[in-house]
Image (spheres, grey):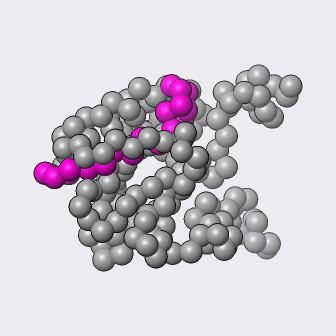
């Protein structure tokens, strides 16, 4: 059995990052929550994606202000925006609103982002989609949080298991056909 078939035909983003040599640091963990209460304090709200209502690679991240870690998306600066120093309730409300406006949105999955000592350094709001419009049930996104030596946490966002948006224009397998 070769390596490709052992991995189910795809290589997860995390493995690619670790093998590429361009990503050195500590991989951080996330944990799904039934309910999210960020408590008090202030947060920097990171809105990744959202270039249009069909941008399925969209996610909202609440980065706790005042801790030693700074969460930054890996990507061009036009793919995200950061709104600084929001109250916990305002950051949650605006993050939820950002996710709710997406095409095919069904619900939001909430996750804690853990630092290297397992303390919570932020929260992630990720959209779950309706399978009738995306071709898959629920969670399409793969996010990886990589802690760098300077306490910056780089966030990598991509589709899970080689998912390709069937409405993406144009490309093989899209509704628009091969043009």
Q: Quadrant location of residue 122?
A: bottom left
Q: Position of residue 61 (x, y in %)?
A: 37, 48
From the viewer's perspective, tell me whether residue 146 is left or right of residue 76: left
From the viewer's perspective, tell me whether residue 10 is left or right of residue 142: right
In the rendered image, residue 39 lying in the magenta stretch gets the answer: yes
From the viewer's perspective, tell me whether residue 15 is left or right of residue 4: left
* Quadrant of the drawing holding the N terminus: bottom right
**What kind of secondary structure does the magenta stretch mostly adopt?**
loop
> Which residues lie in the magenta part?
38-56
Task: Identify the residue at the far right of this view.
Answer: 179
The total of numbered circles placed on residues is 0
Residue pictured at 34% horizontal, 65% vertical: 69
Q: Nearer the viewer, residue 122 or 10?
A: 122
In the rendered image, residue 4 lying in the magenta stretch gets the answer: no
**Whether residue 114 is situated above or below residue 101 in the rendered picture:** below
Q: Position of residue 139 (x, y in %)?
A: 48, 44
**Whether residue 83 is situated above or below residue 112 in the rendered picture:** above
């Amino acid at each position: 059995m070769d390596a490709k078939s052992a991995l189910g035909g795809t290589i997860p983003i995390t493995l690619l990052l670790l093998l590429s040599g361009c990503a050195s640091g500590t991989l951080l963990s996330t944990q799904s929550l039934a309910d999210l209460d960020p408590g008090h304090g202030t947060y920097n709200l990171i809105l990744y994606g959202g270039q249009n209502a069909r941008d399925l690679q969209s996610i909202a991240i609440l980065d706790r202000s005042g801790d030693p870690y700074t969460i930054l998306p890996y990507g061009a600066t036009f793919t995200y925006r950061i709104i600084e120093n929001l109250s916990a309730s305002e950051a949650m409300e605006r993050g939820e609103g950002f996710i709710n406006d997406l095409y095919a949105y069904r619900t939001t999955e909430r996750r804690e982002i853990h630092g290297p000592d397992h303390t919570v350094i932020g929260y992630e709001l990720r959209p779950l989609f309706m399978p009738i419009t995306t071709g898959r049930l629920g969670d399409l996104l793969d996010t990886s949080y990589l802690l760098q030596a300077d306490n910056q946490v780089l966030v990598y966002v991509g589709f899970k298991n080689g998912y390709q948006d069937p409405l993406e224009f144009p490309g093989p397998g899209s509704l628009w056909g091969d043009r």
